[in-house]
Image (spheres, grey):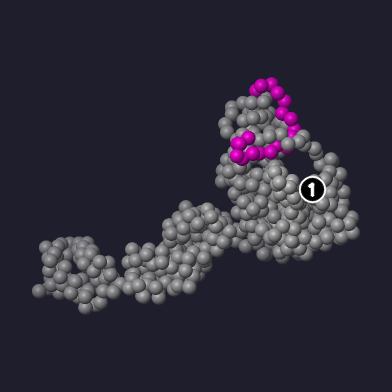
Amino acid sequence: MKNKKYDVVIGLEIHAEINTNSKVFCGCKNSFGSETNTNCCPICVGMPGSLPVLNKKAVEYTIKAGLCFGSEITNLAVFERKNYFYPDLSKAYQISQLVKPICKNGGIELASGKFIRLNRIHLEEDAGKLIHKTKTIGSLVDYNRGGVPLMEIVTEPDLNNAEETVEFLVNLRQTLVYAGVANCKMEEGGMRCDVNLSVKEKGSSDLGTRTEMKNLNSFKMVRRAIEYESKRQIEELEAGCAIIQQTRKWDDNKGKSFSMRTKGDSNDYRYFPDPDLLTVEIDKHSIEEIKKTIPRLAKDRIKTYVEEFGLPEYDAVILTNEKYISDYFEECVKILNEPKDISNWIMTHLLRILKTQQNYNSESLETDLNKIISPKNLTAIIKLLENKKITRVKANELFEIICFSPNLKAEEVAKEKGMLNQFSDEQLQDAANEVLKQYNTALSDYEKTPEKVVKFYIGKIMALSKGSANPQKAEILLDKKIKEILKK
Ligand SMILES: [Zn+2]
C-alpha cells in the first residue's frame, strides 16, 4: 500500500512448532491429527505436583534455527512462567522465556538487500486448542497441543508493507523447513504469525500506536490483514481519531479486523523464573556441534544448481521452493547425471500433477513425490529418451501409465506395451534406400551443406517409421549411403 503522507511500520511475532518427537516438558507424542486428548499426561495438562523435564532436542533445534539466521546464542537460558488464565492453558501459566532467551539478534536479508533484524528467538510451550460447538454443547478443549515445543521468533519493526512481510515470512519458513527444525505446515497451525502494525507520519522518528493481529496462518491472510489494517489506521488518523493499542482479530471471510481486547504489556503477565526448571547452560562446544548439523539451505542449493549443474536460475528457484521437491530432484540427479532433463520433467510433469492433487490430498503428496513416481522410474524414462530407445510422445505416455503405480518398472512397461523403438536394422536399410530414391534431388546439395541434407533424410525416415527408427543409427547409415551414391 502506498500512501504519501504515512509510513507503515510492521513487526512480527512468529510461532513455529518445533518438530521433535515428544513434547517440550514431558514424554507425550508431539503429533498433529491424533484423537483429541490422547497425547496428554499429568505434566502437559498441568496436574498439581507434576514436574516438567526439558526436552534437549527442542533446545538444540532452537539454537540451530538461531544459527541459520546469524543470531547470538546465550550461554545461560532461563525459563519463566507467563501467568494468564485461559481454558486452553490448564496451569494458568505458560512456560516461556523473557529475560534470557536462547537466541538474540540475527536477521534475514530480502532480495532488495534490505536487512530485517530479529530481536530474539525463544523457546516456549504451546497451549491446547479450543473447539467451539456453541450451537450444541458449548466449547471443548483438546490438550494434545498443550506442551508442544514452540519457537517464538520476534522481529524488530523493520518491515514497511505487505509485500516485504510476505517475502520475509516465505524466507523464514523455507529456512526452518530446510534446517529440519520445523515443518511449518501453516494449514495445520504449525506456523502462526502475529502482526504488530502502526502508522506514522512520513519521516517522523516517533512510532505510532500499534495494534496486534494474532494467529494469521497463511501468507495470503497476512497480506490482506496488513493491507486492511494500514488503511484503517490511516483513515482513523485522517479523521482526527487516536489509534487505540489493542489486539484485533482478523476475519478472513469478512476481510476485516475486529477489536478483541486492549493489549497489556509484559508486566501484566507477572513473569518470574520457573522454580521447577534449572537454568540451561549452553557451552561453545555444543553450539559448534549443532552448527555442523545445519544442512545445505535453499540458497546454497540454488548456487549448486546454477554453478555446478548449469541450470537457469529460474529452474533453480522453483526446484528449491519446497525442500521435498529439491530433495527429490537431487535424488534423481544421483541416479542419472542429467540435471537439466530431470529439472524439465519435474517442472512440466510432476509439478503439474502435484498441483491438481494437492487440493484434496495435500498431506501425503506434499511430503512424498515418490507416490507419484519414484526417482528410479523418472530417470529410467529420461534414460530411454536419451538413448533414443523411445520417442518423446511415447515417453510422455509411459509417464502417465506408471504414475501412481509404484510397483511398475518403466523399462518393463515400455517393453510390454511395445513402446520401445522397434524399427529393425533391416527396416532402416530399406527406409534409407527408399527416401534417398524418392527425394534424390536433395542429394545435389550434399557437398555444400551435408548436415542439412542428412537431417532432411532423417526426418523422412522418422516420418516413414512413425517415429520408431533410431535417428542416430539413421544418421550414420545415411551418411555412408549418400557418399556411396555420390562416388558412383
Ligand atoms: Zn504430557
Q: How many marks?
A: 1
Outermost residue, front side: 136
470 is higher (above) or lower (below) than 12: below
Nearest the camera: 409 or 69? Answer: 409
**Is 55 one of the magenta-colored residues?**
no
Q: Quadrant of the N terminus?
A: top right
Label 1 SS? loop
Q: Residue at x 43, y 59 (%)?
A: 349
In the picture, residue 30 is in which quadrant?
Answer: bottom right
Residue carrying label 1:
87
317 up-or-down from 381: above or below: above
Check disc 1 and give the amino acid type: Pro
* Occupied quadrant, residue 28: bottom right
Q: Position of residue 486 (x, y in %)?
A: 12, 70
What's the magenta region? 238-256
Q: Position of residue 242 (x, y in %)?
A: 72, 25
Residue located at (82% from left, 45% from top)? 85
Q: Position of residue 468 (x, y in %)?
A: 28, 70
x%, y% of residue 341? 42, 63
Q: Residues within 10 Å of mark 1 (few under 14, many from 20)?
A: some
Seen in the image, is 202 located left or right of residue 447? Answer: right
Please name the residue shown 68% across and 34% down the image.
Answer: 258
Label 1 beta carbon less than 8 Å to ligand 1: no
On the question of residue 272 being in view, the answer is: yes
| 369 sits to left or right of 280 | left
Taking the spot 42% from the left edge, 72% from the top edge, the residue there is 410
